[in-house]
Image (cartoon, rainbow, N blue to C red):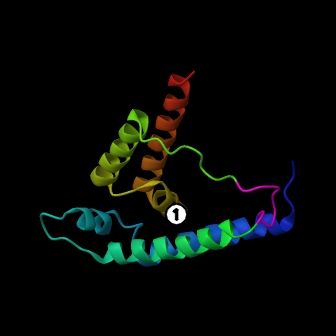
Amino acid sequence: MSMNIEVRLVGLGSGLLLGAGLMLAGMTRPEKVLAFLDVAGEWDPSLAFAMAGAIGVFAIAAFAARARLRPLWAEAFQWPEAALVDAPLVLGSALFGIGWGIVGYCPGPAIVSVGAGSIPAAWFTVAMGVGMVAYRLSRR
């Protein structure tokens, strides 16, 4: 299935906008993220404002999307179906949080940082990829 040029351009534009937003908010700087997570020390609450803004934009977009019968470039929406909070979800969330707290990167900002030439982010991204492959292999 090939995508038309409009879909590719929208995807590219969305990715560039996300990357610019992550850089502007400071989420590509591990020291800023770690300062945000350090609630018992010298806490930097500025990322909370970036997250609140992102949640607000997403809420508006999700509300508008739910009002549509179908998306612009697909036959149907693909909304999440799972609503159960189970052990794999809790374990995965905990691992994500622990990794974020140790390194100061989560996947999106790490990939943006790799694009900006960060060697530590590249190592993190490689390790993340290895972990993803290991998980998939363990599920077979």
Task: Please rate how many residues cluster around mark 1, counting C-alpha atoms within 10 Å: few if below 14, some from 14 to 19, many from 20.
Answer: many
Foreground pick, 116 / 111: 111
Inspect the image, locate mark 1, and give the three-letter code of the amino acid beneath it.
Val
Specify start and end residues of the magenta stretch as a single range: 69-77
Which residue sits furthest top? 140
Foreground pick, 67 / 60: 67
Residue 74: within the magenta?
A: yes
**Residue 65 image position (x, y, % from top left):** 67, 68
Residue named by callout 1: 112
In which quadrant of the rendered view does residue 39 lie?
bottom left
Foreground pick, 58 / 131: 58
x 70%, y 67%: residue: 12
x 46%, y 36%: residue: 131
**Residue 72 image position (x, y, % from top left):** 80, 67
**Residue 109 image position (x, y, % from top left):** 46, 62
- Which quarter of the figure is the C terminus placed in? top right
> Magenta region, mostly helix, strand or loop?
loop
Residue 10: within the magenta?
A: no
x 35%, y 42%: residue: 95
In which quadrant of the rendered view does residue 133 lie?
top right
**Residue 60 image position (x, y, % from top left):** 57, 75
Does residue 128 lie above or below 101 as drawn? above
Q: Is residue 17 left or right of residue 127?
A: right
